[in-house]
Image (spheres, helix red, strand yellow):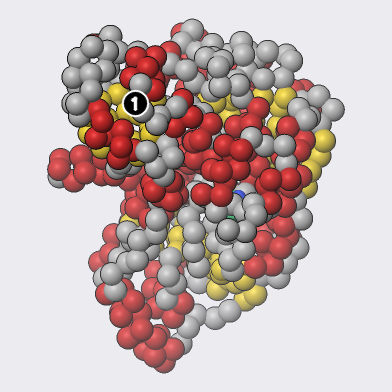
Amino acid sequence: MSQNNFMHYPLDESIIKALTVLNYMSPTQVQKEVIPLLLNKRDVIVKSQTGSGKTAAFGIPLCEIVEWEERAPQALILTPTRELATQIKEEIFNIGRYKRIKVEALFGKSSYQSQVKNLKQRTHIVVATPGRLLDHIERGSINLNQVKTVIIDEADEMFTMGFIEQVEDVLKELPKKRTTALFSATMPKAVQNLSEHFLKKPQFVEIESTDTTKKRIHQQFIRVEDDNKLSTLKDIFVVENPDSSIIFCNTKLMVDRLTEKMQAAGIKIEMLHGGMEQDDRSRIIQEFKRGYFRHLVATDVAARGIDVADIGLVVNYDLPEKTETYVHRIGRTARFEKSGKALSLVNPKDKNTFDLILKEQDRLIEEVTRPSRAMVDKYRIEFDTKQGQKPTLRKEKGHDFKDEIMKIHINAGKKTKMRPGDVVGALCNIEGMTGDDIGVIDLRDISTFVEILNGKGEMVLKTLQNMPIKGRMRRVSRSNESDYERDLKRMTRRK
Ligand code: AMP
């Protein structure tokens, strides 16, 4: 196997190993700049878009810095939406898998009690939306005294969504001696103020690749009127026939309506907006990521920062009111060195907004006309064929860990007085097992999940069928399905 270029950083072997499984073989530009700074505990402001590998740019040094033995959280990541919190948690969990890093995500509309319980277990890194974190702080259910590194992710979005004051309130609660990093795609005044107040002599990093990303996005616009907007969109869809796409609307209502109309026209498309139940939002995002369906109609709040590979087309069905939002939206395509197209439908009443977008974009947004009838007819069969094809599902991010890591389930937990030490003790009694072969232990009320590393899962599973744990025989089984797959099954059963 070729050498992993992350070896040139002072990173623990366990982290290099995880990066290799993830197939992160060379650092991206933002990683090259940010990893050494954070490892050296320097405050940093990073102007960079999502899609540049920025989550790992802070995730890798955080996993390196945290000390496994410490029980209270040592690193905190603030992010504007629940979806982003989940995404970041997954990425960091994968990077820290062999170091057995425990990551906890705290966000609203999800069980407060189970978050409190999880926080009582060892937690190395917390990913949180500011509101829910403040709740935990106020109720005293989180100990932040050991926090040494703080990441403020998507700071401009925090500002747009009205969270900046909450972010400030959180920062005031943290130990003064710490490293702070702020990530933002754009630098509005409020974000600059925040960094002046809360960062110490920050190093400023601007990632050129924002520009190369933009180069890879082919930006176009079509002039439309209200009464031909929908038919124009349908025609574009047929002619462009993208493998995957996101259509942005400005309101939930519009998302509802447009989805209904597109579905009525026989287009397989789903929707995502902030008014939907959290379960449905998570399911839709996971299914979109995996490729269960290929097209999505969404508002900005729901689609923020979402990392989905291969989105070939982004459509602004409604033009966003802010240039910053335009930049975010088009950034959903051309991710990770791919190319893509962003097409905006521009109404005469959008003139002022669009003029501003044109002015602030340093690249050309090419005007094109609606595809002709003949064009649409020509591409129709191809479009219908693609729609009828069964989607090819993408692997889950952590999928490649499965060969080496087996998650087992033990039917005993906190209520039966099981403790992590009991599990470790039993496992280390098995011949050929050492502490290094035990991954994350997740102790729940009546069950315990343990990851067995280094391909030793089968052997452990077999041995535990005839071996007591804490003095008693326990039911031990394999649990390799992801939480998501379990949730999906549960939801399908409910329907
Ligand atoms: P982000 O900017 O954090 O949303 O990351 C964009 C995508 O790049 C994600 O799917 C990451 O998993 C992927 N990625 C991040 N770093 C690397 C790397 N060094 N090599 C390959 N892929 C990466």
Toward the viewer: 396 or 292? 396
Query: Residue 469, position in %: x, y?
Result: 26, 18
Viewer-closest of 394 and 292 = 394
Would you say the beta carbon of the disc 1 residue lies within 8 angstroms of ligand 1?
no
Question: Callout 1: helix, strand or loop?
Answer: loop
Q: Is 172 on the left or on the right of 140, as rendered?
A: right
Image coordinates of residue 4 in percent, x first then y, are 64, 52
Q: Compared to 314, does 134 lie above or below?
A: above
Q: Residue furthest right?
A: 201
**Quadrant of the image occupied by residue 78:** top right
Q: Which residue was labeled with disc 1?
A: 430
**In screen coordinates, is 389 left or right of 13?**
left
Q: Is residue 230 visible?
A: yes
- Residue type, numbered disc 1: Ile
Q: Nearer the viewer, residue 469 or 383?
A: 469
Which of the image's four quarters has the C terminus?
top left
Query: Residue 120 in the image: x percent, y percent?
Result: 43, 13
Q: Is residue 154 left or right of residue 309?
A: right
Q: Could you tell me which residue is drawn at 52 percent across and 50 percent down? A: 22
Residue at 39 percent of width and 42 percent of height = 455
User: In the figure, is residue 160 to the left or right of 239?
Assistant: right
Q: Residues within 10 Å of mark 1 (few under 14, many from 20)?
A: some
Identify the residue shown where x is 20% and y is 22%. 474
The quarter of the picture where residue 115 lies is top left
* Residue positioned 49% across, 36% down in the render: 97
Q: How many marks?
A: 1
